[in-house]
Amino acid sequence: MAEITFVGAAGTVTGSKHLVTVGGKRFFVDCGLFQGTADVRALNDAKLPVDAEEIDAVVITHGHLDHTGYLPKLVKDGFDGPIYCTPATAAIAEIVLEDAAHLQQELSEHGHGHEQPHAPAPFYDDRDVARTLRKMEPVEYEREFSVAGICSARYSNAGHILGSAFVHLAIEGKQVLFSGDLGRYGRPLLADPSPIGAADIICCESTYGDREHPAESITALGEALRAGIARGGAIVIPAFAVERTQDILYAIAQLQHQDPAIANLAIHLDSPMAEKVDALFERFGGERREVAGDSPSTPFGIHHFTEHRSTEESKALNAMPGNFVVISASGMASGGRILHHLHNHLSDPRATIILCGYQSVGTLGNVLEHGAKTVRIYGDALPVRASIVALKGFSAHADRTGLLRWLHTCTGTPRFYAVHGEPASAAALAAEVRQELKWSAQVATRGTTVTF
């Protein structure tokens, strides 16, 4: 008998952590941090169903923090097994986890972004991250590998970010599939998700299981940029360093070829982490689509582009007058350099803040998206006078139609579990699967175990 226990990303979007138990051995599929409101973040302190030293391996689907961010804590607590991932995921995880350790130290010293609660002690430090990275064993797409000697596994391209994969597990005669985060079809930078093939059990993300993405993200960004130019002030774009920043840079590069006003706009990237990820698009070029206009000096052929690496270079943006764009992390304004730029510009009626993508409940991005008149950053109460624009078309997740399109590539009639979604979106996707595909489908519940 084999079991799956839903430890995280069940009833929430973040904290992906699924425990597979076979014949007394155990491994995690994904090992991420919970993010969002204080009560959701508190789940990071919950005791795991088994001790860390009893975990035999970890199988990672991709490098985002909500799928990898708990790994150094697991290692710190005694985990000593292999961590499997694709080569690009290993490279991204190094960037993401080192940044996470730094950010935790920063939050411990200064409080959590705009909320300013009691500052928690860091979950882990640079030494724990270094030990974690040494345990990673990269595996190429479509190559079979053994996990803890109890099952075989194989990664297929999920099309979400560089290196992202869904994982097939062959366990006691059953084909068990974990989607990780599924990407969108027809994106400009990455290939489409691979087809599923045979499966007896599918654990599938449901972030956008109840809605569709707008069709024209680049068009909407162009409208927001032109409105920002007309206002006359800074245009501040919070963006995740991994994938979202690259999508935005690509979109701006396309707009520069179409609109003279945007072509003359200075673009500043204030995210050393995103700069490192930009370089990975060249290193792992086999995973990306060909992009016209690529330049060896600037990413995706963008013009009037400046990268800000040091703290001094970042601070220099504070005194810059007039129209310019600054892109900085984090994408939900939950920490990082973007907080300084929002602190400087939120109260300026000439400024424009462009939120690109999902803003989790409890984050500063979500508060701004829902019309807050005043926010608190670094202890200062700031009136929100800047124009706030929320764009929904830049998500790297498949929407309802994309998820169903992918599920239709399954050649079996599996049991289906919706994970990695808010309750409403997970329930909606499970209902669609029951109605359209005629599968047995339900929403996974945190802490519950299913057997097969």
Image (cartoon, rainbow, N blue to C red):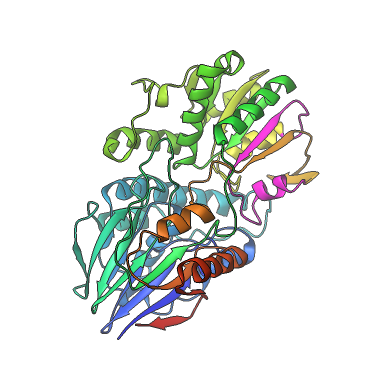
Residue 74 on image: x %, y %: 38, 66
Q: Toward which corner of the image does residue 345 lie, by quadrant?
A: top right
Residue toward you, 414 or 259: 414
Residue 312 on image: x %, y %: 53, 27
**What residue is shown at x 57% (from left), y 51% (from top)?**
107
Residue 335 on image: x %, y %: 58, 46
Residue toward you, 320 or 220: 220
- Check if residue 360 falls in the magenta segment: yes
Residue toward you, 428 or 422: 428
Q: Is residue 362 above or below residue 227?
A: below
Q: Toward which corner of the image does residue 284 lie, by quadrant?
A: top left
Q: Is residue 91 above or below residue 292?
A: below
**What residue is shown at x 65% (from left), y 28% (from top)?**
223
Residue 268 on image: x %, y %: 53, 25
Whether residue 231 appears in this view of the structure is: yes
Please report the bounds of the magenta region as a residue range.
346-371
Q: Toward which corner of the image does residue 282 lie, by quadrant?
A: top left
**What residue is shown at x 68% (from left), y 53% (from top)?**
116
